[in-house]
Amino acid sequence: MNQMSIVHLSAITKQFGKVTAVEGLDLLIKEGEFFTFLGPSGCGKTTTLRMVAGFYYPTKGVVKFNDRDMTTVPPEKRNTGMVFQNYALFPHMTVFENVAFGLKVRKLNKAETKTRVTDVLKKVRLDQYADRQVSQLSGGQQQRVALARAIVIEPDILLLDEPLSNLDARLRDEMRAEILRLQKEYKITTIYVTHDQVEALTMSDRIAVFNFGRCQQVGTPTEIYNEPVNDFVAEFIGETNLLPVTEVQGGGEKRTYRSEALGREVTVNDTPLNIARYGEVDELRMSIRPEAVEVSVNQFSGPNVYPGTVKNVQFTGAAVHTYVEMNEGLTLVGTALNQGPSTYLREGADVFVRLPEDQIRIVPKAGV
């Protein structure tokens, strides 16, 4: 099993008529890796997945599995297992028949088919439902059948297209854990498509962030979150405060930027963690995560401290979000773990906001 499980996409472009769905894509997905395509709808992630599966052929570029050129090989000759958003099960068949379908197509004998189907149904915890009609199952159970059907053929690559978007929140969490458990157990190279950031951050070894048919950044969840390459990635992954800035001076251990919205200058540590690469003509943005913003009724010492007024306090259970109006039209959000009612700031309170120099990220505006 898993003879061919490195996926290499080089210079891939896909056009539908005049619309370019994917442009100039280069990706190398490693053997046994859980790799996620993340982005808003219509950004090219599903189109890319379908080119890996063989449902679409690229207009330009090459798809390779290991060293084998698969660019125009039909889907049934690729040995990939695909799980669709709508499950695509056969409602009139039993769970067993649905899972056995791919093996039947591959002309496996009955005994071997039974062994493999029984084994995979145990792994997805549906062995007692083998004879049940698929139409009698819950959404979560149907999702498991779809997973079992993809895994039973022992694919080299497992492809999952937004497989959890039809489930409720709690079931989604359970299924996330389930998919990861199976992926680790079978060690299958897996490509997962989602627009859900939490799903991407919690499940992936690496993530490719897409927008407008282009891959913006590839990295581990912590790299993507802590070191976004541009404002699109910073804003799409997690929450952030984003302000336009211009560079005032560099050199030494700090750089200074001016924010018109704040009406102030901001100093930032001059490190690769705090300052993304940008060119002279790039428009710049300052990104600071709400969990890094400090808010207090007492004056802070040090740089990047600004006065503001509490506009709104939002309690979510585990965390408290404090919205602080800095100037007309500018509100910054600070998020802190819930430490009990005595620590909540009240609306209308005059406060100080501190933006730590080592927590700010300066990024260029994404080009379209």
Image: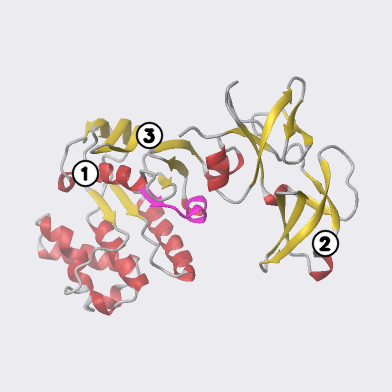
Residue 199 falls within the magenta-colored stretch:
yes
Type of amino acid under label 3: Leu
Which is in the foreground here, disc 3 or disc 2? 2
| Residue drawn at x 67%, y 65% as measured from the top left | 318
Label 2 packing within 10 angstroms: few (<14), some (14-19), many (20+)? few
Question: Pointer 3 and pointer 2: residues touching (CB < 8 Å)?
Answer: no
Q: Tell me the CA gap for discs 2 and 1.
A: 58 Å
Q: Is residue 121 above or below residue 236?
A: below
- Label 3 sits on a secondary structure element that is strand
Q: Image check: 110 left or right of 119?
A: left
Mark 1: few, some, or many residues within 10 Å (few <14, many ≥20)? many
The picture places residue 332, in percent across and down from the top left corner, at: 72, 50
Residue 36 screen position, x and y as percent: 42, 47
Q: Amino acid at mark 1?
A: Gly
- The answer to whether residue 80 is magenta is no
Q: Secondary structure at mark 2?
A: loop
Query: Rounded to the nearest whole Å, what is the CA distance between mark 1 and mark 3?
Result: 17 Å
The segment highlighted magenta reads: 189-201
Residue 192 horizontal side relative to residue 2, left or right: right
Q: Nearer the viewer, residue 217 or 155?
A: 217
Q: Which residue is mark 2?
A: 348
Q: Quadrant of the C terminus?
A: top left
- Of labels 2 and 1, earlier in sequence is 1
**Total residue callouts:** 3
Judging by the rendered image, the residue that carries numbered circle 3 is 27
Give percent across and percent down for residue 150.
Answer: 26, 57
Q: Answer left or right for 275 relative to 210.
A: right
Nearer to me, 268 or 282? 282
Q: Residue at x 49, y 70 (%)?
A: 170
Please name the residue shown 53% across and 41% down the image: 232
